[in-house]
Amino acid sequence: MIATSATAEGLGAFIDASPSPFAVCASVAAELETAGYRRLSETEAFDDAAGRRYVIRGGSLIAWNADGAAGHDAPLWIVGGHTDSPNLRLKQHPDRRSESLATVALEPYGGAWLNSWLDRDLGLSGRLAYDDGGAVKHALVTIDEPILRVPQLAIHLSEDRKGVQLDPQRHVDAVRGIADARPIVEWVAERAGLVPGSVLGWELMTHDVTPSRLIGTDRELLSAPRLDNQTTCYAGLRALLDAAPGSGIPMLALFDHEEVGSGSERGAASDFLVTVCERLVGALGGTRDDFLRVMASSLHVSGDMAHGTHPNYPERHEPGHRIDLGGGPVLKVNQNLRYASDAIGEAEFALACRRAGVPLQRYVHRADLPCGSTIGPLTATRTGLRTVDVGAPQLAMHSCRELMAAADVPMYSAALQAFLAR
Ligand code: ZN
């Protein structure tokens, strides 16, 4: 395998520092700055886009390395992923009293596997928008302490003791204490160092505060929240930083809002990627026609997690397509284009795995079960970029706590690096 700086321990630390999409962007930006990348603003001219640069739009981030000889017709080698994960988020009037307890009203975001959020110590993170002398500013906040908990119903109070049906409206509010407390947003604002009463808007979400860790008798497994899809954010970042200059411009494109369909100003269905690409080619001296030529010769690897074959439910998986934890990166193919892969893209990623010296596994979803999707088909539609969907294997996707093999982290990053350095 080619040399890589990606490790399972590194991924665990990245995830623990990044409970919200905004925090993911901050974690990636900090690593990029250390490696000599400079932030550009979309509201300013892109004259200075040659070199190592990145742009942030809300919870989304695009970075590229156009150092050295990259001309205005160099193809773009893009690794894509998403920064958001399913969770429980704060409502607009969150403060409640229910029976004897102070509670906080929460709402599921994306396809959260609700049962997994019960009986866990939860922190809060996200961003606050506040009045700063008549102008709206925003601040990121991470409270990595157990301040909330959604308690499960006692088994003796369930009707048949077999299971509890969870209603996303009634059953996921969190307990925060007993006494009448200050409004939760004010409490968070003070923790963020803001003047109480100045906060006028928020995107606040819960996270499991238990740190990620290697588990198993031989510590071969990584137990962590948000593996889907911070594994790609981390592995793609390490790949970008490790990649030696190749035939094109390596890029990393990480999008918010994948778990709710990508339709926002910063989601994968937005103009974020295509406008950054156009402005980059322009800043390198290219015309509009050069930009269109570059897009036609570029390639996008859409990275998202893949379902490893579950030891307790092997019948839920397509026969003959077992996906092993620790078995290496996964190529995802779907005839109904829930994944964007085509034959050429498949071969390009298979070649990258060959160059990286890592095995490749091929995933097909059962035809009688609904297949999830990724940013792949959306970005392909929006940009016209040839796109291939890939990932790393995991279990328990969309659970509050997910599981993957430690060995897959460096293998996945090495494959992405080989692609970026092609
Ligand atoms: Zn995902």
Image (cartoon, grey):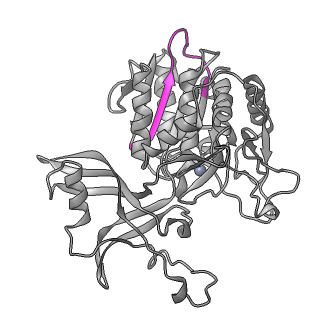
Which of the pair 49/87 is nearer the observer? 87
Position above or below: 145 against 380: below
Residue 249, quarter of picture = top right
Magenta stretch: residue 297 in it? no
Q: Residue furthest bottom?
A: 159
Q: Residue furthest front?
A: 217
Give the residue displayed 57% in from the left and 22% down from the top: 242
The spot of residue 180 in percent (x, y) is 21, 75
Q: Quadrant of the C terminus?
A: top right
What segment carries the magenta color?
58-77
Q: Main secondary structure of the magenta part?
A: loop
The spot of residue 383 in percent (x, y) is 59, 38
Q: Is residue 292 left or right of residue 17?
A: right
Residue 105 seen in this snapshot: yes
Q: Residue furthest left?
A: 133
Q: Quadrant of the N terminus?
A: top right
Give the residue displayed 22% in from the left and 54% down from the top: 189
Magenta stretch: residue 76 in it? yes
Residue 291 seen in this snapshot: no
The spot of residue 266 in percent (x, y) is 45, 45
Which of the pair 230/130 is nearer the observer? 230
The spot of residue 280 in percent (x, y) is 48, 24
